[in-house]
Image (cartoon, rainbow, N blue to C red):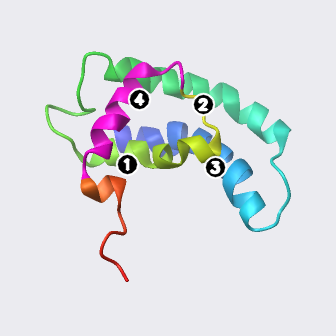
Amino acid sequence: MWVSWSTHHFTRAASVFYWEYVIKPMIGLGSASESAIEEATGDFHRFAGVLDDALSGRTWLVGDNPSYADFRVATALPFAEASKLPLREYKNIGKWHDRLWRFPAWSDPFAGLA
């Protein structure tokens, strides 16, 4: 459920911020489209609210241990600052992502690669 939900909702909304603020400038396509950001902001807040509420009182999205769902739903979060994701009001998302950062493969996915 969470993997599908993220693909169609949370990650989709967050990807607009990533594209506009990170990728477009990186590849020389100009500055962020404020109209695209404005359109994505409402969706982002709606879906971040759903995720934040779901994480209230939980450590992980499914059960008592981290699962693929946690990592898949969180794919936009390592780039949150560069993407200017408006996450400040979502404390449960922040705590959950802090727990994910404790996994070396999440915090440094390219360690050991030449």
Q: Quadrant of residue 5?
A: top left
Q: Nearer the viewer, residue 66 or 27?
A: 27
Point out residue 68 in the picture as x, y percentages from the top left corner: 27, 49
Between the C-alphas of marks 2 and 1, the distance is: 16 Å
SS at badge 2:
helix
- 65 horizontally vs 32: left or right: left
For marks 4 and 1, the one nearer the N-term is 1
Q: Is residue 86 left or right of residue 51?
A: right
Q: Which residue is mark 1?
A: 72
Q: Amino acid at mark 1?
A: Arg
Indicate the position of residue 21 as horizontal and vertical percent values: 71, 49
Q: Is residue 57 above or below residue 65?
A: above
- For the point 28% across and 32% down, which residue is it? 61
Determine which of the numbered discs, if any, sits on residue 94 in the image: 4
| Mark 3 to mark 1 CA distance (whole Å) | 16 Å
Q: CA distance from mark 3 to mark 2?
A: 12 Å
- Does residue 1 appear in the picture of this structure? no
Return the residue at label 2.
44
Task: Estimate the spatial distance between the alpha carbons at disc 4 and disc 2, rounded to whole Å.
Answer: 15 Å
Residue at 16%, 32% in the rendered image: 63
| Secondary structure of the residue carrying numbered label 3 | helix
Q: Where 32 falls versus 62 (above or below)?
A: below
Q: What range of the chain is rendered magenta?
A: 88-103
